[in-house]
Amino acid sequence: MADAPYLVALALVELDGKRALPLTGKSQREASGGEPGEAGRTLALELLLRLWQRSDEGALRRAAAEDSLLLLEMPLEVMSERLPLIKADWIAGGTTEELLASLKQLAQRRWRIGIVKYQPATFTPWP
């Protein structure tokens, strides 16, 4: 199970003028293959609800335009060992470009999360 994939939804935001990178995740039995489907939608909803609750702390703003809401698939070890380090670096003032490049290197598969009116959340491959 050491190389079991982990699905992570994360948001690059500024909350009351300070950077934040909330995330939520779920282990998978196997790689998603295609679109992450219902598991991805559930994680996206959970993350957005957490962001909604935190908006009481101050103004909420996307920090990376269309790359601000992402869903990544990566090994659990990578998620638990490397993701916290790059998250801390970005919150401490690292560049958004460096963070996005690091996330792309960590993830085996990656998507932007979007929404179209009257449709469920969509997952667009993130190049």
Image (spheres, grey):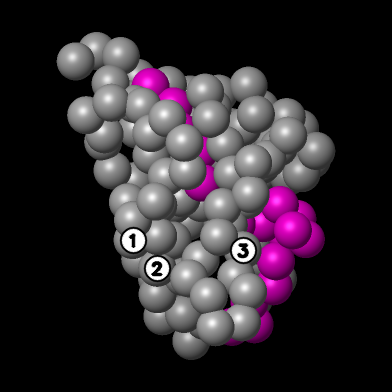
Given residues 17 and 43, the one toward you in this image is 43
Residue at the spot of label 2:
45
**Residue 21, percent from left and from top:** 55, 53
Q: Is residue 84 above or below residue 30?
A: below
**Residue 83, percent from left and from top:** 49, 31
Residue at the spot of label 1:
42
Image-quadrant location for residue 93? top right
Mark 3 to mark 1 CA distance (whole Å): 13 Å
- The tag on residue 114 is 3
SS for tag 1? Answer: helix
**Residue 82, percent from left and from top:** 48, 24
The answer, for residue 54, to whether it is visible in the render is no
Screen quadrant of the C terminus = top right
Name the residue at 35% across, 66% down: 46
Given residues 28 and 13, the one toward you in this image is 28
Which range is magenta? 58-75
State left or right for residue 21 relative to residue 60.
Answer: left
The answer, for residue 45, to whether it is visible in the render is yes
